[in-house]
Image (tube, grey):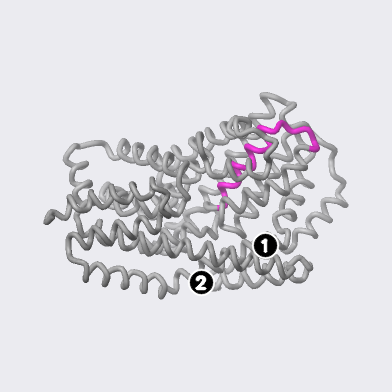
Amino acid sequence: MNDPLIVGMLGMAGMFLLIALHVPIGVAMGIAGFLAFAANSGVGPAFSLFGTEAASAMGNLDLVAIPLFLLMGGFASAAGLSSDIYRLAHAMIGHKRGGLAASTIFGCAGFGAVCGSSVATASAMTTVALPEMHSRGYLPSLATGCIAAGGTLGILIPPSIIMVIYALLTEQFVITLYVAAIIPSLIAVTLQLLAVAWVVRADPLAGPAGPRVAWTQRLAAIRGSWAALALTLIIFGGIYGGIFTVNEAAAVGAALSFLVAWARLRLTRAILIRTLTETASTTGMIYMVLIGANVLTYFVTASGMPAAMVEGIQHLGLPPLLVITVLLILYIILGAIFEEVSVMLITLPFVLPMITGFGYSPVWWGIINVIVIEIGMICPPIGLNVFVVHGLARDVPLKTIYSGIMPFLYSDIARLALLVLLPGITLWLPNVMGLK
């Protein structure tokens, strides 16, 4: 078969067939890319490509940040930093109507800043916040909905693991993506808080007010959260102040969170082994997906499929905004089914050439990409974060969680529309700081 474009299309069809057969996504991408490249160029060059891409991924020092950020999140969870952040927010605003739900949003944002994972954030905050909201008479829909939605902040608020991967694949600077994510993150938190306010205004019994906490207890909560606040300040200040590279910040964060967990006597042998095992397992999964994606991307690009798609769309004369809208809907569907890293890696070889061809910034698309994957993680009928919360709150039906998600889903869609229509909001801060 001599037509690379046809071989490329068959390779993509084969990849989706393997995924449908429950083959791990990284393996499916690697097999599809290898076989398609072998069909077009021969078995020898295909093996050479596979070996080269594997060695390139394993030897890429920029990827060191991934296991280190995972370790930081694991040790931070073991140290109870999610509880500290939640207790601080609870002490400050928990007495207001809907205050515990708002505290949960703040807690998710704070823990996301030292974790970088949506699933880990949702899991930690379900354990910490849900019992408290249940005890105060919050409707299960609001209680679980705000946790699932707030958990998605974990992959948007820096340091985000998925942004490190995006930066590597698109040859962007990680620090530029982190800076670009700041304003969208603030908008995300603000709109989710407004969603809580809207719910409790429509139904005051959804999140009843509680007793006001004395200032002595508030000060105690501030003192109790010093480790989480200091860790966040060191990581953010180090990266944005030019003191650390991203890898160095990840290493410092992992070391400090380890020391906090150890000093609090939370780091038992079992927890240490579990944290290291989970980090190794997740890192291995990410590397496997990256290697498979690199093999597939190399062939897909060589086959001319992305260029043909861009040329076809330009020939049709479709408005860029219409094409982007269709892509966003596709991302939401994929994000509801697949894990976020996989969604990004499967689609980037095709989508990024279209975006840059329309004249949009890869940095802007990176933030939009993360946001739309966030939405997919809470979008019915699946939504990964919804199942994470349901797995830890078996007494709450899935239907109830989906019902509670809807106000937050609307707020996320409004945020997405705002940032798509006004790209300058995302790019303003990097431009002011002179980052490219």
Q: What residue is rendered at 19% in x and 54% in y?
A: 304
Picture disc at residue 22:
none
Q: Does the magenta run of residues contain 99? A: no
Residue 236 visible: no
Write the start and end of the magenta stretch as one range: 135-154
Give the CA separation, mark 1 to mark 2. Answer: 21 Å
Q: Residue at x 55, y 54 (%)?
A: 157
Residue 297 quadrant:
bottom left
Vertical arrangement, residue 179 with respect to residue 242, above or below: above
- Rendered residue at 36%/64% (across/down): 171
Q: Hey, what amino acid is under mark 1?
A: Ala
Residue 274: x percent and y percent? 65, 65
Q: Amino acid at mark 2?
A: Thr
What secondary structure is found at the residue carrying circle 2? loop
Residue designated by label 2: 245
Q: Is residue 29 visible from the viewing direction of this image?
A: yes
The one nearer the camera, 260 or 193, is 260
Quadrant assignment for the C terminus: bottom left
Res. 76 mark: 1
| Residue at the image point whose x is 39% and y is 40% from the top | 328
Closer-to-camera residue (346/217): 346
Compared with 154, 242 (above or below) is below
Q: Position of residue 37 (x, y in %)?
A: 23, 61
